[in-house]
Image (cartoon, helix red, strand yellow):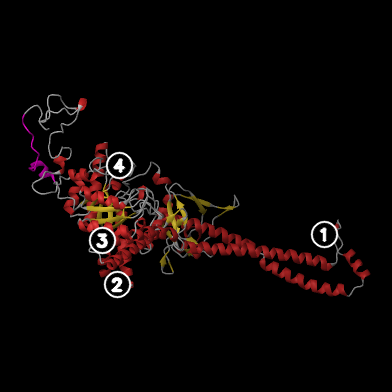
Amino acid sequence: MDQFGSDQVIEPLVSEDEGAVKDALSFGTAELGTTTNPMGNTLDSVKSRIMEGAGRLEFEFIGKGKGNSQSPTPESFGVRERQDMRELLTINDIKSSVHASVHTESLAGFGRDGFSGAQREEALREIKRAIDFAGDVTDGGAIVFHLSEWQRPMVHAGQRKEKQWMFKGYDTEEKDSPMLVVDDRTGRVISGVTRDTYVYEPKFETVKERNPSLIGTRVDGRLVTGDEWVDIKGQPVFRDDNVERMFDRVPVWNKDKTNFEVEHLTWEKFVERADEYNKLHPDKQVTPEEMFARTTIQNRVLQAKGSSLYHALHYDAFQKRQEKLRQALELYEAYEGDLPPEAREQLKELVSDVPGVAGQFTRGDYQLPTEIIKRELEDAENQMRHIHESSASADAQAIEYLEQIKHLKTAEEYGLEKTADSIAKVGLLAMEESRRKGLKNPLYAAPENYDQHLYGSHPSEMRKVIEEGRKAMAQQLVKEKKAADLKQGLEIAKQHIKATLDIGHMNMWRQYFDPTDEKGKSIYKTAEEREKAFEKWLLNESERLIKDGIVGHVHLTDNYGYGDEHLTPGQGNVPMKEFLKRMEKAGMKDLIVEPGSYNISTSLFDTLSLVGSPVYGVGRLPRFNQVQHAHFGYNAPPFFIAGAYAPSNDWRPWTEVPLE
């Protein structure tokens, strides 16, 4: 059937092409794997992948909570099906990993109002299900789950070099994106400051204005410069004094306007104050957003204390008045009790209930002295009750604010601690499951970079998460006496905590890549320069994560830098071939091709073609890229197309039988 107008038969290609061999990478089906179908029966999908020739497989689950036929979870498959899967993997010598639900929440427990322990546990619950499944089905490997930690401005992702941002979500992001500050006791967000926020606070008297003779002297061992505030006695209030001391400052009184002066604080002022504080406290650094939160809360304390003081000013006088009224009441009750009825009525005519000057010209109701005293006593008691409620509640509020100032943390500082603790827990569970099930290879927590809008997706954030997670696990191992010291604990933790690098997710930073100089102008003149610079960043950062032992598992998907479309590797604008070359050089052996909606049965073999992997079988066989679009090993196109679709009518099959 392969004659084309001649008697010459085109033989199948069995010799290796020199160019294909030269450009080929060492990846084969043992290193390059694919996933099960996340929206179908997992056992059937395992069988299909084995029949297709996959040598590495990742179980992928899209379901969360209770699964169904379109969204199965690890718990959708019972003992018998799990055993079938395990035997299929073992018989066919297939390495495997498990991807927990792609809908998992923040490992730090971040939600609408801040960080929540309940939400954190919900995220861990889905991962625990994946670990349990992996212990029954696999022989060790990655437990993959997304890092979707908390919102942060994209301009803050990674390291800033001088005044240059590498990424930007939108034009005004640096000014109007909120930076979160939380209460480290509860995890609740107490401030979301933006750079374009204006704050007003009272203007306080300084040493150089009130008591300049102190400049150059030392008070409590500290040098007085003149910029310090002063208290009512003219003594300096240092800017790094404790919070309570801040309320001894004296606000500036404007006689002409009969009010206290206020000053307008911009973001730059908080940056300046944070820098000053950090120079004095190198071991207790604060950020400008923490300084902002501190200032706004201090203003609330001032207001609360002022309210308390206002209501409490006449408290002693009210107490004395109440006591005098009680004494008078006792006296007049005794006096009136001895009077006959006629005298009591005469006494009423002598006493008016209209006080003050007006009482000289008007007459009110005639009452006994005891009746008037009781009413006055009731008024005094109500006044004191008002002071109790207003002043006491204001004092309590002030104390609450003062305590809050002592517990300020940025979302990153607080959240990173919670995320690390969650990952440490996953690592410990993976270690225990590996031991309990006697797995050949260790199970390990493999958090994956995901959404660029959320913390954990940038390479530097991934590094922090993994390093802090390992430290937390090492500390727990020492605490549980499962490691002799932190050094041994870290070595164990490295086996059970390794990140998953998704190159497709990382490529989506492309749309936000916008390096600018300190004036906000783009560094690169052309789009081509910008694209090359981004790809250099992507490749270098990826390679560094591998070489530093941060990453142990890789997902291969492609896109055009916008959406997570899961194109076949090599079909988007990810510099895939160069990336794979660097992975080969770094010794990465665990790579999973994640198909999308339209390439579920072709993505693995197209990727094997991309790397020039040989076809596996008996004898000398060609490579995938030599036969990818061929017909049963022949380079020529198939000639069994009938009718108008046939390439030509100048040929006939050897049987002389028309194909129609």
Left or right, residue 19 beside residue 369: left
Q: Tell me the element at label 2.
A: loop
Q: CA gap, disc 2 to disc 1?
A: 85 Å
**In which quarter of the view is residue 546 placed?**
bottom left
- Give yes or no for residue 251 being in the magenta stretch: no
Q: Is residue 33 visible?
A: no
Q: Count neighbours of disc 1 (C-alpha within 10 A) and say few if under 14, some if 14 to 19, many if 20 or more.
A: some
Task: Return the mark for residue 354.
Answer: 1
- Name the front one of labels 3 and 1: 3
**In which quarter of the view is residue 352 placed?**
bottom right
Where does the C terminus fall, quadrant-wise?
Answer: top left
Residue 402 is situated, as x and y percent measured from the top left of the image, at: 50, 63
Q: Nearer the viewer, residue 210 or 33?
A: 33
Task: Return the mark for residue 140.
Answer: 3
Where does the N terminus fall, quadrant-wise?
Answer: top left
Q: Tell me the element at label 3.
A: loop
